[in-house]
Amino acid sequence: MWTALSLIRMGVSQLKAGSFMKMPSLHLLLFTSNTFSVIEDDAFIGLSYLQYLFIEDNKIGSVSRNALRGLRSLTHLSLANNHLESLPRFLFRGLETLTHVDLRGNPFQCDCRLLWLLQWMPTVNASVGTGTCAGPSALAKMQLTHLDPKKFKCRATELSWLQTVGESALSVESFSYQGEPHIILAQPFAGRCLILVWDYSLQRFRPEEEMSAPSVVSCKPLVLGPRLFILAARLWGGSQLWSRPSPDLRLAPMQVLAPQKLLRPNDAELLWLDGQPCFVVADASKAGSTTLLCRDGPGFYPRQSLHAWHRDTDAEALELDGRPHLLLASASQRPVLFLWFGGRFQRRTDIPEAEDVYATKHFQAGGDVFLCLTRYIGDSMVMRWDGSMFRLLQQLPSRGSHVFQPLLIAREQLAILGSDYAFSQVFRLEPDKEILEPLQELGPPTLVAPRAFAQVTVAGRRFVFAACFKGPTQIFQHHELDLSA
C-alpha cells in the first residue's frame, strides 16, 4: 500500500534520530515551511521503502553527515530553498537509487567544503539541480555546474614542532646510507659533526655517531656504495675528510684538505663532474680561495682554484641547459655563474641587480630553474633562468636573513626565509603565478638565528630541520590538511 505524509506549516521544530520509526511503510514524506534548522543523524532510519523525500522552504542551516542513512529506496530528494551554505561529505553515500536531487535556492558558499559535491555530481546517474553560489564574492551568482573542481585549492600544508636538538648548528644535511635516512649537523660550539637517525621505537631522532670538528661550519656527506665520506669544513685547524669504509666501522679522519687554500671556509657543496664526485669549498678569506676538490685515488685533491680574493660566502652547484654550473656568492661583488667546460669551471656571467647577496639556492619547477637569493640587508629575491640570464621575479623583505632555502616536500615547492630579527617565514610556490605566497610563520618555538634548513622523509613521515646559530636545532613535522573534509 502506497503511504504518504505531508507536514506543511505544522510547526515541526526538530528532526531527531528515529523520528519515523513507527511509520516504516512510508513512500513519500514532505516537509514545507516548518521551523527546524538541523537534520540530525539517522533522522529517517527505518524508512527503507521511502522513495520521495521533499524538505523544502524550511530554515535548515545544517544537515548531519548520516542524516539520510538507511534510505535505500530513495529516488527523489529535495532540499530546495533552505539556508544551507554547505553539505557534509558522504551525505549521499548508500543512496544508490537516486534519480533526482534538487538543491536549488540555498545560499551555498562555493569553497572547499563544497568541493566533494562538485566531484560527486558527474559520477552519478541522477539529475542534480544545484542553483548558484552565494559566495565567496568572486564566485557569487555563478552556477555550481559551471565550477571547475580542479581550480579549487583545498590541500593545506602545515609545519608543527616535533623535537629539539640541544646544541646550536650552522649547517644541516640529509642523506641516505644503507637504505636509511640520516641527518648530519655542523655544531661549531660543540666542536663536532653530529649524525642523527630515526629511532623507530621512541619515534624521534637520536644521535648515531659524532666526529670531532672544532670550529666546523659545514659537514658535507658523500655516499659511495658501502663507504661514507664526510667533509668537515673548519674555520681553524684545517678542513678534514673523514671516512667510514663499511657500515660496521666508525668514522675516522683520513685526509687534511688543501691547507694553503682553505683558510676560512664558509660553505661546502657536493657535485658530480664528468662522472666523478667533487667538493667545492667557498672560502671567505682574502688570502685563501674557493677550491674545487675532486676524487683522485683514495682521497680528494685540489682540481681548480676559483674566485681568489673575493671572500666567497656561498657555493651552489646546479645544472642549466643540461650542463654543470657553479654559482658563487661573495662579500665583494655580485654572484658569479661558472660553466663546466673542458675540464674546468669558466666564468659565464654574473647576476645583474643582485648586490650584497650572502647565499644562493636553486630549485626546479615546471621545467624552469629558479634561484632564491639571500640578502642580510635589503630584500631577498627570487629569479628564473631565461636561457642566458637569471631574471628577477619577486622580492621579499628579509632584514637579518642568512638563509632562503627551497624545499620540495610532498610534491609542493616550499621555501623558508630565515631571519635573525623576526619570525622565519614559510612560502609556497604558486605554479600559475610563478611567485612565492606566504604560508605560515615557522614556530613556536622561535628559531634563534637560523642558518640552514633540510628535509628528510622517514617511514612515510616528513620532517624539516632548522639549524640555528644562537639556539638549539628545531625539528618540525610536515602535515597535509584536507580543507574539504
Image (cartoon, helix red, strand yellow):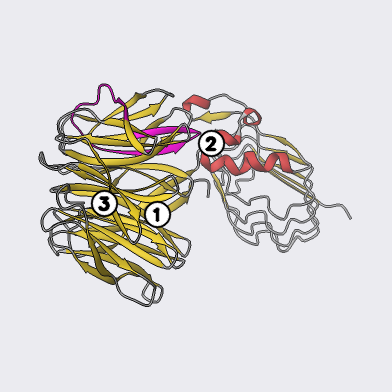
Question: Disc 1 marks which amino acid?
Answer: His
Residue 348 lies in the magenta stretch: yes
Q: Earlier in the sequence, mark 3 or mark 2?
A: 2
| Residue 65, visible in the rendered structure | yes
Task: Using the image, determine if residue 196 lies above or below residue 469.
Answer: below
> Relative to the observer, which residue lies in front, 198 or 177?
177
Residue at image position (16%, 34%) is: 310
Tell me which amino acid carries mark 2: Phe
Res. 59 visible in picture: no
In the image, which is nearer the foreground, mark 2 or mark 1? 1
Q: Residues within 10 Å of mark 3 (few under 14, many from 20)?
A: some
Going 15% across and 42% down the picture, which residue do you hit? 284
Residue at horizontal 83%, vertical 52%? 3
* Residue topped by disc 3: 443
- Rate crowding at label 2 as few (under 14), some (14 to 19) or many (20 or more) other CA atoms within 10 Å: some
Q: Is residue 443 left or right of residue 6?
A: left
The residue singled out by tag 2 in the image is 152
| Quadrant in which the N terminus is drawn | bottom right
- Between 23 and 231, the residue placed more toward the observer is 231
Using the image, determine if residue 3 lies above or below residue 61: below
- Which amino acid, mark 3? Gly
- What is the distance, in whole Å, between disc 3 and disc 2 at their CAs? 28 Å
Q: Is residue 159 left or right of residue 237?
A: right
Side of 288 relative to 49 (left or right): left
The CA distance from mark 2 to mark 1 is 22 Å
